[in-house]
Image (cartoon, rainbow, N blue to C red):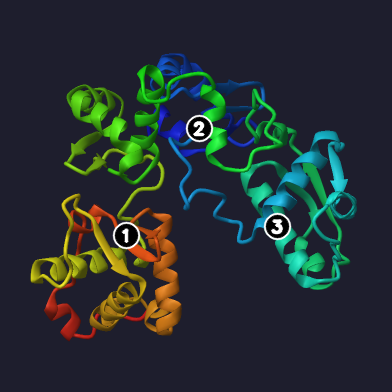
Amino acid sequence: MSTLEILLERRWILKHREKELYYKVKDEIGVLRPFFMEKLGYQIVVNPYLIKVEKLPARPEPWMGITDFKDKREYVFFCLVLMFLEDASEQFILSQLTEYIQAQFREEDIDWKEYLYRRQLIRVLKYCVKMGILTVNDGSEDEFASDGQGEVLYENTVVARYFMRTFTQDIMNYTDPKQFGKEEWIGVDEDRGIVRRQRVYRALLMTPGLYKDKSLEEDFAYIRNQRNFLGGDLANYLDCELQVYRNSVFLILGENCYMGRTFPEENMRSDIVLLFHGLVLEKVHSGEISVGTEELVLISEEYFLELLELCREHYRNGFIKTFRDMTTQEFCMEMTTYMMQMGFIQWENGNIRISTAAGKITGKYPEAFLEQGGQDEQ
């Protein structure tokens, strides 16, 4: 992977974990700094502990967040962990942290005798260890998970203070995620000049695709007018191709580009989405699904679930065992969540809006393959 791909994909590069990579990126960061600053408006943090690009999305999306977390309480626990680490000594034990969280939590009384709270805290702590915020020196969270009595000795790696970005405004009164995006451009026309350019670059690099709506008219006008420049500029840095359609824009990565999460992924969920897209395209060609003048596919939730069930019924023999054994309800819930995370569907006034990617990225199994019973059990 190139240095640019590494910086775009990762949250940060920690010196205590990857010393050689840390120095390699540090030596090359000067060449890339103008691209991050001018095209994306991203600040770069370089200090004796880490290298980090302060990445911000073009706009908040439903799929954004820490995917390891399952409940908003875990985000609160995580923030309290970061607060605790600000003043914590180099080493501390788990009971010190749990007492701090109990004292600071405002929304409800936290009782560590309840398994739900313990499980959620452990999920947060495991994420902290994975990210390099904490190191386990002795013990395991398993005992704490079972009865709430186990102790763990942690080491504070001091990088917790760099996890959150620094805000120039007081955010305590924010009520909408969009306010965080506006915070960096206060007093600037967001549909003109550098702001629009940075927003477009961010959207191209940080989202699966752009789909035209009223809020994106200015961005689409900019992309259409600058498509050759944008495509050439991005190709100078990455193995990619910019594809611009009437109502959608996609950045297609080449075989030599390994930047972040892409689609299709190498998993069954991704394969099922391709099969589902193929089924939707068939319904469009047969006239069962109508496409609006803006390439808009809007169907009822009930019909969407029917299509998912039909996809499962038709292609089930090609699924791995985990998906073959799912109930219809489990399958529909799993795939709906995944498709929302990837930006392929959106809720819109009680209906489901299917992205135009459904007509461009499809797949199917050969009939002979399905007739033979599909894949071996896995």
In this view, the residue in front, 96 or 196, is 196
Q: Is residue 378 visible?
A: no
Mark 3 and mark 2 lie on one chain; the one further toward the N terminus is 2
In this view, the residue in front, 323 or 373, is 323
Question: Which residue is tagged 2?
Answer: 55
Q: Amino acid at mark 3?
A: Arg
Residue 20, located in which quarter of the rendered image? Answer: top right
Q: CA distance from mark 3 to mark 2?
A: 24 Å
Neighbour tally class for label 2: few under 14, some 14-19, many 20 plus, Cα within 10 Å: many
Q: Secondary structure at mark 1?
A: strand
* Residue 362 percent coordinates (x, y): 20, 61
Outermost left residue = 286
Question: Which residue is tagged 3?
Answer: 73
Q: Is residue 5 visible?
A: yes
Q: Secondary structure at mark 3?
A: helix
> Which label was assigned to residue 353?
1
Q: Are marks 1 and 2 in contact (CB under 8 Å)?
A: no
* Residue 366 percent coordinates (x, y): 14, 74
Q: Residue at x 40, y 67 (%)?
A: 336
